[in-house]
Amino acid sequence: MKKTVLSVLALLALLCGSCDRDAKLVEENIANAEVQLSALLAQSLEGEQVRIPSSYRDGQVRFVPTRDWVSGFFAGSLWYMYELTGEEKWAEAARTHTEHLHDIQYLTGHHDVGFMINSSYCNGRRLKHLTEPYDTIIVNAAKSLCTRFRPEAGVLQSWNVDRGWQAKRGWACPVIIDNMMNLELLFKASLISGDDTFRNIAISHADKTIEHHYRPDYSTWHVVDYDPATGAIRGKYTAQGAADESAWARGQAWSLYGYTMAYRFVRDERYLQQAENVVKFLFAHPNMPADLVPYWDFDAPNIPNEPRDVSSAAIIASALYELYGFTLNGEYKELADKILVSLSSPAYRAAQGENGGFLLMHSVGSIPHNSSIDVPLNYADYYFLEALVRKQNVENGQVVVDL
């Protein structure tokens, strides 16, 4: 009996020690983010107009216009700082940056309106119960996204093919795995408006992506080109990966996150199984590094002498916490925790006062386009903060992600 009591006490001590470490990891990252993002926020508000920080290169913060696909992530990071700290100054700053994106609700030129509005307006609505005009803007943005739905193919077209580098590829209706992320806007717009059209389009896109985007090992092609008139597959390619047949790391991250999120709204077991199969691919892959921060492509030709992509790691960690909430599979939480520990280390997290105010170093935008290689990226910070929010919810026994 005495041995049993001592064993229980030892187990409780171990668990308490683990809880303390978890809490300290979150708290220490919040304290660090308050310093870094305060500096970055100050730079964003210099001058007469709000500026949107995107990256930091050659000693300069890089800013983007509102129509850039990453334009909502800094507002989203500010919303997450409010959620993590409860301090109104972050909510006020988040509203300023969110409402700067007002006209995105009418953007029909590309699919990324989902990224832009969900990270900004949808977080503001969730955290501060902002309804009007936030509800109207969210629904209008969903309508804009739906103009890209191609009924015969059953998918949302990602890119236009009449301009830019995409026009040189010979595509007719390119759909990228990234587009799974934009479905969250449609699901939320459906709940807000009561209009199932948004939800039905999202489900159609998710179903077609399962059918056509995945290889037998549950890695994903980056681009599937459809015939918009017949729905036939014209070809499968990459745009940002090492090769058409390779597993571009951020694409695998979008894949995991996208189906975990879709399960949140639809509760279709196929989506949950798809997400779990992607996890198996990711963490059984021989080229996944020991610290779980992927190379930019799992099949990049010069591994281990290839850039890591911190943005992929942050997205994967955030998705794993939500997946843990659905399954209670402790392995998913352990993997997410390990990623956060890695990202919180000096190898990936910038020292205070450095990196232009961004939190994380060593992300990759697109190596084939020679764009944003080994730099901080605002979406890496966004998903890192989101992962911290979700970890905090897990540790506190709260719902990991609410609608």
Image (cartoon, rainbow, N blue to C red):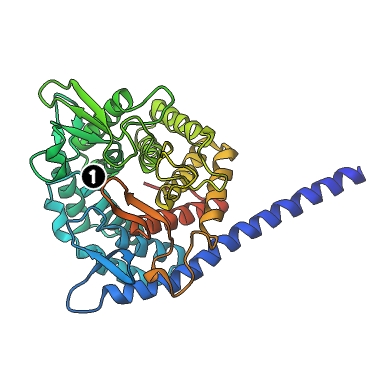
Q: Residue at x 52, y 36 (%)?
A: 283
Outermost residue, right side: 2
305 with respect to 55 (left or right): right
102 with respect to 207 (left or right): left
Label 1 sits on residue: 189
**In this rendering, is residue 118 above or below 49?**
above
Secondary structure at numbered mark 1? helix
Q: Residue at x 30, y 66 (%)?
A: 94
What is the crowding at mark 1: few (fewer than 14 residues within 10 Å), some, or many (at least 20)?
many
Q: Residue at x 18, y 74 (%)?
A: 49
Q: Position of residue 26 (x, y in %)?
A: 54, 61
Outermost residue, left side: 162
**In this rendering, is residue 27 above or below 318?**
below
**In this rendering, is residue 60 above or below 198?**
below
On the rendered image, what quadrant is the N terminus found in?
top right
Q: Position of residue 339 (x, y in %)?
A: 53, 50
Looking at the rendering, which quadrant does residue 221 occupy?
top left
Q: What's the amino acid at mark 1?
A: Ala
Q: Residue at x 54, y 54 (%)?
A: 342
Looking at the rendering, which quadrant does residue 16 occupy?
bottom right
